[in-house]
Image: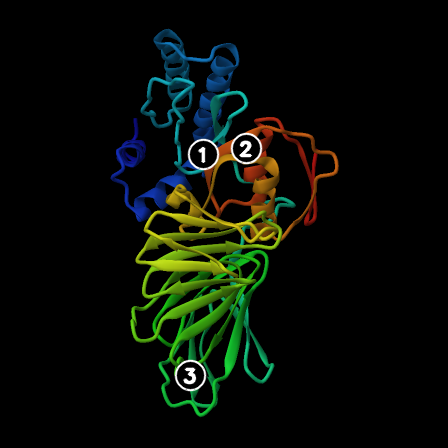
Amino acid sequence: MSQSTEHYEKLLQKYLDGQCSITETEELYAWLQSSPAHRSLLSTMQREFEQAMNTRHEIPAEVSDRIENRLLEEITQHKVVRLHYWRWTAAAAIVLLLAGVYFIRTSSLRQTFPIVAVSNSDGDVAPGTNKAILTLSNGETVTLDSTGNRIITQGKTLVHQRNGQLQYAVQNNEDAIIYNTLTVPRGGQFNIVLPDGSHVWLNAASSLKYPTAFNGAQRMVEMQGQGYFEVAKNTKQPFFVKVNNMEVQVLGTSFDVMAYTDEKSVNTTLLEGAIKVQHGNNQQRLQPGQQAVLDPATGAITVRRPDVDQVIAWKTGFFEFDNAPLADIMRQLSRWYDIDVNYTQVQDSRLFGGRISRNLPLSDILHMLEANGPKFLLTGRKLIVK
């Protein structure tokens, strides 16, 4: 075994042990994608695992050994790195998040499939990037992206664009309140630091309207789409987020609001601090780890405890699903990849689960889903689900 291969074998073992740094993970990813010989090991794992799962609901030790022996043969043939293995059972989800290896499971089959994603950029759709449109108080618009580095002035207000972030200088002496609007299109995301120091991350197809200075008795912003807030604490000046006909009152906290018009509910999830969610006469106070679910049709608000990591996966660079219908997945993909999805031929009641990087080209994700049943036809930015 060459010294170079030994190096990557150590990196892989560090990753599996949860000790791999971001830089080391990126290095390992690049190496695994650099040659078809390296990727063949991952393809073999997928093929052998699926064959076993299609014949048994559980994988006993002898079947697991057969898979491992087959993989060892592949390693010897191609002189690629050895993988560490677990004893697999159908009841245990296998999370392989290494360099294009992700998992998709279909709950109707009660099975979990490791899926190998191989990038192919020919005719593909690239993932979203940091981009947005800033609309100033006079109606002027400024296009923002991930590379910009400049200062935008409007009256006494200074706005700094640094790469994928917009930051407002603190101003307390504005003669009149003026408003800006940050609009993130489909296929984008952006981060803004408000005049009070609060941070807001906006997901694709979202917008935030806010004053350029918080001078009154309260801090009020208006949002559409999805945003993650880290609000600067100021008990004398409470923070409010207006979302459609709902209002979130904040004292100083971290929370996520998902309020897309094509979703069935408006979900407000509290991570830290305290918030009150109000719609008409209905209101709910949340504790950390709770989620308020508003039914727009009835105005009813219910409280539940969601998987918080799943709720904010978009902010950390992932799609994460747990027993999600295919339509739910397609709505997220349409926003992030800026594609139009056609469901006219779909009759699929299966539920999917998994965790997938948002940095992958669209074809990789479609290949993973296709391995579990659905078929897709992508033409330009139009996707037909079959």
Amino acid type of the residue that numbered disc 3 sits on in the rendered structure: Leu
Disc 3 target residue:
158
- At x 66%, y 31%, the residue is 375
* Outermost residue, bottom side: 175
On screen, residue 145 above or below 139: above
The one of 184 and 360 positioned closer to us in this rendering: 184
The C terminus sits in image quarter? top right
Residue linked to disc 2: 368
Using residue 363 as the reference point, say whether residue 385 is left or right of it.
right
Q: Residues within 10 Å of mark 1 (few under 14, many from 20)?
A: many
As drawn, which residue projects farthest toward the top? 62
Q: Residue 311: x, y in percent? A: 43, 47
Instruction: Assign a secondary structure to mark 1.
Output: strand
| Label 3: element kind | strand
Left or right: 263 in relation to 192: right
The colour style of the image is rainbow
From what the image shows, is residue 34 above or below residue 86?
below
Instruction: Please name the amino acid that badge 2 sits on.
Output: Met
Per the image, the residue denoted by label 1 is 102
Is any part of residue 163 visible from this angle? Answer: no
The residue closer to the viewer here, 382 or 92, is 92
Q: Residue 183 is drawn in which quadrant?
A: bottom right
**Circle 1: residue type:** Tyr
